[in-house]
Image (tube, rainbow, N blue to C red):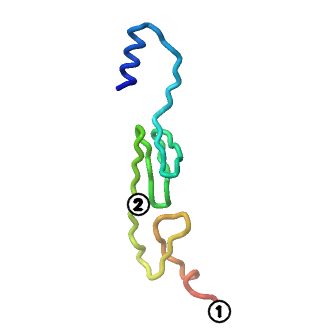
Amino acid sequence: MKTILYVLFVLACGAVPVVSVPLSTCVTSTGLHIADGYTFKATPCELCTCHIGHLTCGVQDCALPNCESYTTPPGQCCPVCQSVKDSVPAI
């Protein structure tokens, strides 16, 4: 609202000052500034988007793989089946 009033004031006065106006940003819990419209992975399972100064995050829902032995690889969210080679100890 203040921005609209300022623009109307400038138009009514006929003066156009040079003003640097930063874009809306979001701040994460760790203090990181995120640009408006930017989407990023906060964790392997959490996707966040900055929208007009508000950070919105969603968590990916993973189904368990249809196998006896599974693992979640580092940096990934959802578990995957282990190969037979990985699950059988070498003799």
- What x and y, as percent, mark residue 43? 49, 58
Q: Which residue is painted at 39% across and 48% down in the image?
A: 56
Q: Which residue is painted at 48% across and 72% down in the image?
A: 80
Numbered disc in front, either 1 or 2: 2
The amino acid type, in three-letter code, at marker 1 is Ile
Above or below, comparing residue 16 to residue 60 in the picture: above
Image disc number at residue 60 = 2
Return the disc, 1 or 2, that comes first in the chain's sequence. 2
In the image, farthest residue toward the top: 14
Badge 1 vs badge 2, beta-carbon distance below 8 Å = no
In the image, farthest residue toward the right: 91
Instruction: Please identify the quadrant where the C terminus is shown.
Output: bottom right
- What x and y, as percent, mark residue 69? 48, 81
Q: Quadrant of residue 85?
A: bottom right
In the image, farthest residue toward the left: 1
Above or below, comparing residue 26 to residue 13 in the picture: below
Image disc number at residue 91 = 1
Above or below, comparing residue 16 to residue 63 in the picture: above
Image disc number at residue 81 = none
Name the element at disc 2: loop
